[in-house]
Amino acid sequence: MNYQNIKSVPRFLKLEVVAEQVSMGKSTILAWEALDKFPRAVRLSPTKRVWLQEDIERWINEKHTKAKEGNRLDKTIPPKGVKTTGEDENV
């Protein structure tokens, strides 16, 4: 296959590399994969599994987007000790 016309060459990542990239343990990755909470590995043989870098990057970006959305929602509840409009300690 000629990869010159493709933006990037598909790259396989070993479990150790995936674990480092997502800052998770290998056993957690395997458990989450089984629960469909993590991208599926590509089976190269009965004992060899790898992940597509593109799938891992997409998963990371999805988690980042959800975290940012969650942070926006959390801003509706003021942190403990922060006064909201209408609260005046001199009243």
Image (cartoon, helix red, strand yellow):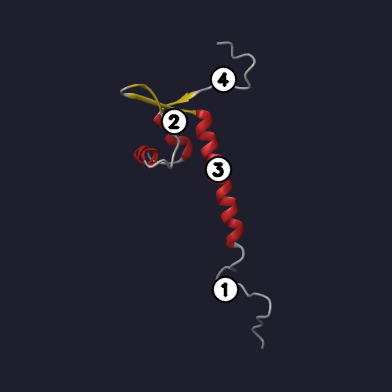
Q: Residue at x 53, y 45 (%)?
A: 63
Q: Residues within 10 Å of mark 3 (few under 14, many from 20)?
A: few
Q: Which quarter of the rendered picture does the N terminus lie within?
A: top right
The residue under label 1 is: 81
Q: Residue at x 45, y 41 (%)?
A: 23
The residue under label 4 is: 9
Residue 80 found in image quarter: bottom right
Image mark for residue 31: none
Q: Quick one: SS at disc 2?
A: helix
Nearer to us: label 3 or label 1: 3
Q: Which residue is most to the top?
A: 1
The residue under label 2 is: 17
Q: Earlier in the sequence, mark 4 or mark 2?
A: 4
Q: Is residue 56 above or below residue 87?
A: above
The residue under label 3 is: 62
Q: Quick one: SS at disc 4?
A: loop
Q: Amino acid at mark 4?
A: Val
Q: Amino acid at mark 1?
A: Gly
Q: Earlier in the sequence, mark 4 or mark 1?
A: 4
Q: Residues within 10 Å of mark 1 (few under 14, many from 20)?
A: few
Q: Residues within 10 Å of mark 4 (few under 14, many from 20)?
A: few
Marks 1/2: CA distance? 42 Å
Q: Amino acid at mark 2?
A: Val
Q: Earlier in the sequence, mark 3 or mark 1?
A: 3
* Picture coordinates of residue 67, whole percent (x, y): 55, 51
* Picture coordinates of residue 72, whole percent (x, y): 62, 57
